[in-house]
Every structure is written in C-alpha cells, then in structure tokens.
C-alpha cells in the first residue's frame, strides 16, 4: 500500500464522516421544527383535563411525545400568558403543585388547531402517497 493510497483512504473516510454529520444535524434540526408545533397541539389536547407538570410529561410520554422539563415549563408559561391555559397552585401530598387546564379561549384555539391539523394531515397523506 502506497502513501497516496493511505492518504486517499483517510481523506475519503473523513469526507464520508463529515457528510454524515451534516446530514444528521440537518435531519435533527428539521425534526425539531416539526416537533415544536406538534408539541403545542399535544399539550393543549392533553390539558382538556387538569394536570400538573409531572403528570402532563408522563401522559405525553406514554403517547410517544417525549418532552423535557426545560421545554415543557417555558411552554406552559407561554401558553398561559397567551390566555390559552389557566393555572392554580394547590397542595397535594403535602407539596405545592401548579395545576394547568385549558381556558375557554384555549378550547376554541384547540378546536381550530385540530381542524387545521386534520387538513394538513389529509393533504400530506395525499402528497406522500403520491
């Protein structure tokens, strides 16, 4: 094996690894964009019944929608500031917990978003099946 062959092989391997990293990063970025909107819809739908953060995370996870605390709690605060949720602190099991539920406006928005979601889903299914 010549030095040229070794250099060519090393360069080719590094190029392939670099390309795979770029593709992985690109996929991950696009996947996160897709999940962002879906998480909002999932949180709103799940909060048709009152829950606190831990039970909400658990319920979402059980349906395959993993969400970490660093994403969930800022999202809940934002949705509440937008008037889509209401919350209240209560003591349960000797601990204070903040319970969330959809507001009247949140119910209206959820209904509209679900309608939009169904329309998008139908369109995408038609496009993907081609």
Image: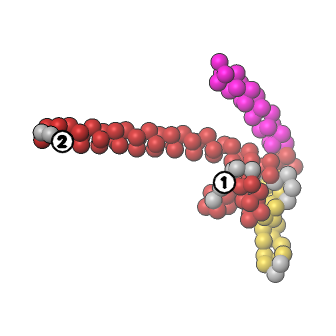
Q: Position of residue 22 (x, y in %)?
A: 41, 41
Q: Mark 1 near mark 2, Cβ–Cβ under 8 Å?
A: no
| Disc number placed over residue 29 in the picture, else none | none
Where is mark 1, residue-wise? Answer: 66
Q: Earlier in the sequence, mark 1 or mark 2?
A: 2
Q: How many marks?
A: 2
Instruction: Identify the coloring.
Output: secondary structure
Which quarter of the rendering shows the N terminus?
top left
What residue span does the magenta drawing correspond to? Answer: 108-130
127 with respect to 89 (left or right): left
81 with respect to 90 (left or right): left
* Label 1 element class: loop
Q: Is residue 78 visible?
A: no
| Disc number placed over residue 6 in the picture, else none | 2
Q: Position of residue 60 (x, y in %)?
A: 74, 54
Residue 48 in magenta? no
User: Height in image: 1 above or below 63?
Assistant: above
């Amino acid at each position: 094996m010549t030095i040229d062959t070794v250099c060519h092989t090393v360069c080719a391997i590094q190029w392939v690894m670099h390309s795979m990293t770029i593709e992985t990063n690109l996929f991950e970025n696009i996947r996160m964009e897709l999940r962002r909107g879906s998480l909002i819809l999932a949180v709103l739908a799940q909060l048709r019944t009152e829950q606190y953060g831990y039970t909400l995370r658990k319920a979402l996870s059980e349906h395959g929608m993993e969400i970490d605390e660093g994403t969930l709690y800022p999202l809940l605060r934002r949705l509440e500031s937008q008037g889509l949720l209401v919350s209240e602190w209560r003591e349960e099991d000797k601990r204070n917990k903040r319970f969330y539920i959809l507001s009247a406006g949140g119910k209206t928005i959820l209904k509209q978003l679900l309608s939009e979601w169904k329309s998008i889903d139908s369109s995408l299914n038609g496009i993907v099946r081609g």
